[in-house]
Amino acid sequence: MSNFFKLLVNEQYKLYIRKSTWVMYILVSLIILGLAFLANFAQGANAPGTNEKYQDSNWRQTLQQENEELKKQLEEEEMMQGYNARQIEENNYYLDNDIQPNSYDAWQFVMENEFLLSLVSLFTIIVAAGIIANEFKWGTIKLLLIRPITRTKILLSKYVSVLLFALFTLLYVLVFSWVVGILFFGINGIDPHIVLNQSESYSYVSVIQQIIEGYGFQLVTLLMMATFAFMISAIFRQSSLAIGIAIFLMLAGNAIVTFFADYSWAKYIMFANTDLSQYTNGTPWLDGMSLGFSIIVLVVYYLIFLVLSWVFFTKRDVAGQ
Amino acid sequence: MSNAAIELINVKKSLGKKEIIKGLSFSIDRGEVFGFIGPNGAGKTTTIRMMVGLMQITEGDVHILGNSIKTDYKEAIREVGAIVENPEMYPFMSGWQNLMHFSRMIPGITKERIHEVIKLVGLEKPINEKVKKYSLGMRQRLGIAQALLHKPSVLILDEPTNGLDPAGIREIRKYIRALASEENVAVIISSHLLSEIELMCDRIGLIKNGELVATQDVNAATDQDSATPVQMEVTPIEHAIELLKSNHDIDATSDNGTITIQSERDTIPSIIKTLINNDVLVYQVSITKSTLEDKFFDLIGENTIE
């Protein structure tokens, strides 16, 4: 085993032996199970998402019938306007293109659980914030650093450990959602397609492609915020501060950009650029932004975070508490 | 290159404009136990942190087996085992898991070696318990075990007797002596309590306000030939004082039924002989040892931090 690999083993070991890490996984599991129960329960009612009623040869009539009902409802209730109009449009797409709607399955369940990535981001921030600061809190940093290993290597092993944690947790969300999805809803083959509203029009798309895109775009925020928390942890050696600042910024990021949107420098704020999906479905948030611009801004921020972490971790004295 | 296991060369440390370590130079040979004594805040821990590379050295250098801690960090630190301040370990892991963790950071540590070290510090029984359940004494032992894993040439122990009961201190003393003589390890022990480490050190260095005030060979300090105070319980006192004055030319002071004289060790038998031959009753004779503590207390003066 190489030196660096052993350091990774150490870091992962310290991470996964602690109960707090397992609590995170249990929490994610419970949420996924809860979501499955809710979706399963909703299937009994008139839930359009489940598409159970289209699974016979009369699916065209069923769709048309549903459209008429929705139209009637539209005239009576103002409240349902947006939702019903969209549903009618979606149904029409199926009818126009003569596609039988797929039933709700594990793939769609996985796709809808995309929002759980913000939970994964949150957990990754907590781990990133603690991985250096805790060594200082426990006093073990002194024993960790007096080994024939450079501080740079130790820092890198910790950073890679954070990324591994994020990866494992992400894979866990994907796999567990998929397995629970199969148990609750079954599965429609290897690569089912559904009709989705994209960039103000409907199209027939692969669910798996949607999963990759949806999760992929969120990974950008995850990576940036985890690296940010890691940096704060390395600079201030305090996990609560790092968690606090990182979560606050993650939640307030969009508000910050909106607040400064009138200034020309607003596009250089990291949070204006973290959502890369703005370039695939829709227009860029601010003037003068393009995919290339955003990637450069993100890379610059990323490098700043890493360099600051490195400088503070390797150059500063480890003094008494 | 010198023979020294660890050598400090005019080591200085400044924090901002304040110089807290003002040029320390000393060296410790293999097989020697060096006591590093000073009042709280004198700079012991700062010096130790510089010796192991936790703090940067502002000026000067530390050589470990000839390798500079500044420029050849990896080679230098490979030969060092240390506890810096408290023996802090991962509380949520067992003693065994902690040792495994640190053994993965240095190449060439076998499972047999870990067992050997555990046996040496006497932690066989609680080794699989979580460290948070350990007493301070047990943590201290685990700390020493961790420091010994890779068979270092230099062992640095910051306050190793802290939190140990008298039996524990005795035991630590025993295996520190054994390590020095059998494994030829240079041991540096810091403490603010001289009496605790006096018995296990060959040499003691006294640090005060960032300066090495004195170094003292322990054996030389206790076996000196100069006049030491001798107390005697005798009757009648007046007669005894007269006899000492006339026969030995010694001035004695009396206090509470005892007399105190300044005498060399060699002349004590003849003094007693004089007293007995002249019908003075001698109940007790005792030599007050001038301890290191007195000597160092004189040097330090009051325990103040400037």
Image: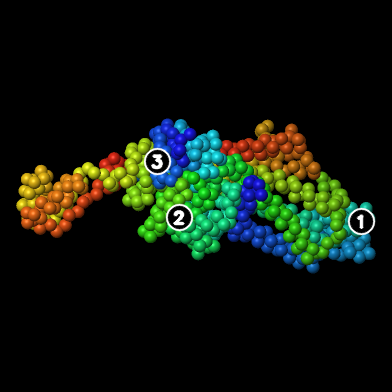
Amino acid at the residue labelled 3: Gly
* Residue A291 or residue B70, whichever sits in front: B70
Mark earlier in primary sequence (3, 2): 3
Give the secondary structure at mark 3.
loop
Amino acid at the residue labelled 2: Gln
Q: Do labels 1 and 2 share a chain?
A: no
Residue at image position (80%, 57%) is: A108
Amino acid at the residue labelled 1: Ile
Q: Name the residue under label 2.
A: B140
The chain containing the residue under callout 1 comes to A
Percent x, y of residue A69:
86, 61
Q: Mark 3 points at which residue?
A: B43
Percent x, y of residue A78:
78, 55
Residue A244 in view (yes/no): no
Cα separation between marks 1 and 2: 73 Å
Residue at image position (87%, 49%) is: A203
Mark 2 Cα-neighbour bin, 10 Å: few <14, some 14–19, many ≥20: many
Count the marks.
3
Mark 1 Cα-neighbour bin, 10 Å: few <14, some 14–19, many ≥20: some
The chain containing the residue under callout 3 comes to B
Give the secondary structure at mark 2.
helix
Cα separation between marks 3 and 2: 22 Å
* Residue A15 or residue B87, whichever sits in front: B87
* Residue A111 or residue A191, whichever sits in front: A191
Mark 3 Cα-neighbour bin, 10 Å: few <14, some 14–19, many ≥20: many
Give the label on residue A99, or none.
1
